[in-house]
């Protein structure tokens, strides 16, 4: 494959578009994930209880509820992106995320307004869930369309570089606050600071996204099938089901080894909260750096092969990794095990958006990618923490490990359905 047919100017424009789209993606995911990493501090403010597991279970429930809005966001923003342009869709989603963060930053606690506090927190998270549900599909589609042919895996991997970067900045923000504020101060007011930072960053992202160039033509947007659910399920049902199948396992294992892992280290492995934050900061940084490497690997071995490696290794290694992690007392060993798990997940995340975008034609691409991802993510990704904590509360924690393994086996089987050459977004067209 070659990219020599691009002029220097066109290469620069496409790379700038990747940077612009992915920087907005970083802000979106920072705003969404900062809730997960602040959960141990904000839980007492909204869910008074003597049992920390119950508090975390309640905050995880609100986290999961945010995911339930993702299918609506995937449909709504996918339709906007296909009918009115990718750029418009991305600008609206980041504006909504900004509003949600600002509301959470200003929310009164349970002590001030009683049951209204968790209710308003839930409403803000539902609003953010709607926004991020649309963000993934539109950004994945946009970045796949502007990526340089022959290097699509490498360039499209920057969606997860910034998605993980959002997580990393979220956990880094918490680590920095832990250096300057006591645990009591963090529980009293410190947890609000990251949400203010996220709201301000979203405004900067909005300015960046205004400069992006639209990737669809007026003719495509005016197509009667553009953004149409009936056209998607009439002509591309098999592709939709395939994407749904491997995204279910991909979402579950991703959230298991990222957002849930900090709580797992504190609540199950019994590590200090600060130590857990350090481990996750280092692991997420390496995970972020892995994405372009695994993206380049996918350009060499093919997207289908990369997905099969992901499903196969995930099935074989999940239980051994989690069982070993459960009994370790060494932060170094914990760090190595989590990094190894994230390397396996990288076979999927580096090309996640691209491998989905290649399954759908341009007029329903954002809708197909966004809706399939959002449905699978809402059911399996968003519930990961809640299921894990719930099973732990019932004394059946190891059952969760086998659940993840079973979903990885399903992801492997669905990856077998992937075409050897993409149906759309050909490298030579």
Image (spheres, rainbow, N blue to C red):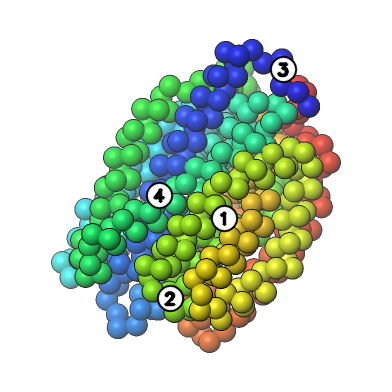
Image position of 308 with respect to 202: above or below:
below
Residue with the mark numbered 4: 169
First in sequence: mark 4 vs mark 3: 3
Decide which of 350, 122 is in the foreground and name it. Answer: 350
Mark 4 element type? helix
Element carrying mark 2: loop
Whether residues under marks 1 and 2 lie with C-beta atoms below 8 angstroms apart, the answer is no
Quadrant of the frame with the C terminus: top right
Q: Please identify the residue farthest to the right as the structure is shown.
A: 420
Kindly tell me whether residue 25 is visible in this rendering.
yes
Q: Calculate the distance from the C-alpha at mark 1 to the C-alpha at mark 3.
A: 38 Å
Residue hosting label 2: 271
Label 1 vs label 2: CA separation? 29 Å
The answer to whether the residue labelled 4 contacts the one labelled 2, judged by CB atoms less than 8 Å apart, is no
Residue located at (38% from left, 54% from top): 172
Distance CA(mark 4)–CA(mark 2): 21 Å
Which residue bears the numbered disc 3? 4
| x then y, percent, for residue 276 | 43, 68
The percent coordinates of residue 154 (x first, y second) are 65, 36
In this rendering, is residue 66 above or below 220? below
Whole-angstrom CA distance, mark 3 to mark 2, is: 52 Å
Q: CA distance from mark 4 to mark 3?
A: 36 Å
Q: Is residue 182 left or right of residue 131?
A: left
Q: Which residue is mark 1?
A: 377
2, above or below 166, in the image: above
């Amino acid at each position: 494959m070659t990219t020599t047919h691009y002029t220097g100017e066109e290469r620069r424009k496409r790379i700038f578009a990747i940077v612009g789209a992915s920087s907005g993606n970083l802000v979106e995911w920072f705003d969404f994930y900062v809730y997960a990493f602040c959960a141990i501090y904000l839980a007492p403010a909204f869910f008074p209880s003597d049992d920390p597991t119950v508090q975390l279970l309640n905050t995880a429930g609100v986290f999961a509820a945010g995911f339930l809005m993702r299918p609506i966001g995937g449909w709504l923003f996918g339709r906007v992106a296909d009918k009115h342009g990718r750029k418009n869709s991305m600008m609206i989603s980041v504006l909504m995320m900004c509003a949600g963060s600002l509301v959470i930053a200003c929310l009164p606690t349970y002590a001030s307004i009683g049951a209204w506090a968790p209710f308003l927190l839930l409403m803000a998270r539902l609003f953010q869930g709607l926004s991020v549900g649309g963000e993934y599909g539109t950004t994945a589609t946009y970045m796949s369309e502007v990526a340089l042919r022959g290097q699509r895996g490498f360039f499209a991997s920057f969606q997860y570089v910034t998605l993980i970067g959002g997580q990393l900045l979220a956990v880094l923000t918490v680590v920095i606050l832990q250096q300057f504020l006591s645990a009591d101060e963090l529980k009293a007011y410190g947890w609000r600071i990251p949400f203010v930072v996220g709201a301000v960053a979203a405004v900067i992202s909005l300015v960046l996204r205004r400069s992006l160039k639209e990737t669809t033509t007026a003719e495509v947007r005016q197509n009667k099938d553009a953004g149409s659910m009936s056209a998607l399920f009439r002509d591309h049902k098999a592709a939709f089901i395939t994407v749904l199948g491997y995204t279910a396992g991909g979402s579950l294992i991703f959230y298991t080894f990222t957002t849930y892992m900090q709580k797992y280290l504190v609540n199950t492995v019994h590590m200090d909260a600060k130590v857990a934050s350090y481990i996750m900061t280092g692991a997420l940084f390496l995970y972020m750096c892995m994405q372009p490497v695994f993206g380049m690997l996918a350009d060499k071995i093919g997207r289908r092969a990369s997905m099969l490696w992901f499903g196969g290794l995930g099935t074989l290694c999940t239980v051994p990794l989690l069982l070993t992690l459960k009994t370790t007392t060494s932060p170094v060993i914990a760090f190595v095990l989590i990094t190894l798990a994230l390397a396996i997940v990288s076979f999927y995340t580096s090309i996640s958006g691209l491998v989905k975008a290649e399954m759908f034609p341009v007029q329903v691409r954002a809708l197909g990618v966004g809706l399939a991802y959002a449905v699978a993510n809402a059911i399996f990704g968003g519930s990961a923490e809640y299921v894990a904590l719930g099973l732990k509360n019932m004394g059946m924690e190891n059952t969760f490990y086998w659940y993840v393994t079973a979903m990885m086996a399903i992801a492997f089987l669905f990856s077998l359905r992937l075409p050897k050459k993409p149906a759309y977004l050909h490298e030579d067209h």
